[in-house]
Amino acid sequence: MYELGFLQGNDVRLTQLRNRLWRAARVILDSSLHTGKMSFEEAVDFLVEKVRFEPYAAELEVGMYIRRPTYVLGYLIGMQELMAIREDYVRLYGEPSPPSQFYDQLLTIGSIPPSRAFSTRGAIAPESPVMTASPRRSSRVRSAAGVPAQG
């Protein structure tokens, strides 16, 4: 949204960058905690000192990382995967118009891994039958490869 001219301002950009820093810190903390390279207290201190969390919020975060190993890694990996898929889409088909077209098409595929959705190349193409049929208007459900789904 920021790149498209929405949500302008230094405060918005600072929040975006802080959130990106937080996601990167999550990867460091999750792997360090679960390999024994960092204690609970060290992880809390890391969030307080490097990401500027309040101590109580850092304790809650680190507690979640301990209770749900690798959970937070999925957010960063998913973001990177979607960015790469979008770059491939733009390279193959140009910028989507309107900008929401790419994400709308990707979401109509359903809950399959994004890399699998794009591995068939035509699955998220603008003219793909999978993308042009609205799931609300059509009772025909298709897989990412455009083959009628079983069931």
Image (cartoon, rainbow, N blue to C red):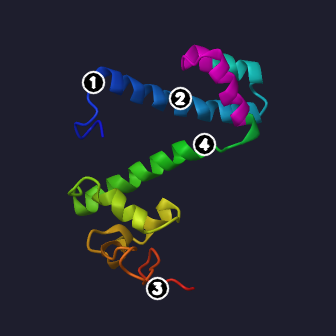
Q: Is residue 83 above or below residue 5?
A: below
The residue wearing badge 1 is 9
Pick the residue in front: 112 or 139: 139
The residue wearing badge 2 is 22
* Lateral position of residue 17 relative to residue 150, left or right: left
* Lateral position of residue 97 relative to residue 136, left or right: left
The residue wearing badge 3 is 148
Pick the residue in front: 91 or 146: 146
Is 32 a magenta residue?
Answer: no
Q: Residue at x 48, y 67 (%)?
A: 110
Q: Which residues are magenta?
A: 47-65
First along the sequence among labels 3 and 2? 2
* The C terminus sits in image quarter: bottom right
Q: Secondary structure at mark 3?
A: loop
Q: Residue at x 44, y 69 (%)?
A: 109
Q: Are marks 3 and 4 in contact (CB under 8 Å)?
A: no
Distance Cα–Cα, label 3 vs label 2: 41 Å
Other residues around mark 3 within 10 Å, as few (<14) / some (14–19) / many (≥20): few
First along the sequence among labels 4 and 2? 2
Distance Cα–Cα, label 1 vs label 4: 29 Å
Q: Amino acid at mark 2?
A: Trp
Q: Are marks 3 and 2 in contact (CB under 8 Å)?
A: no
Q: Secondary structure at mark 1?
A: loop
Q: Amino acid at mark 1?
A: Gly
Q: Amino acid at mark 3?
A: Pro
The residue wearing badge 4 is 73
Q: Are marks 2 and 1 in contact (CB under 8 Å)?
A: no
First along the sequence among labels 3 and 4? 4
Q: Secondary structure at mark 4?
A: helix
Residue 127, percent across and down?
Answer: 26, 74
Distance Cα–Cα, label 1 vs label 3: 46 Å
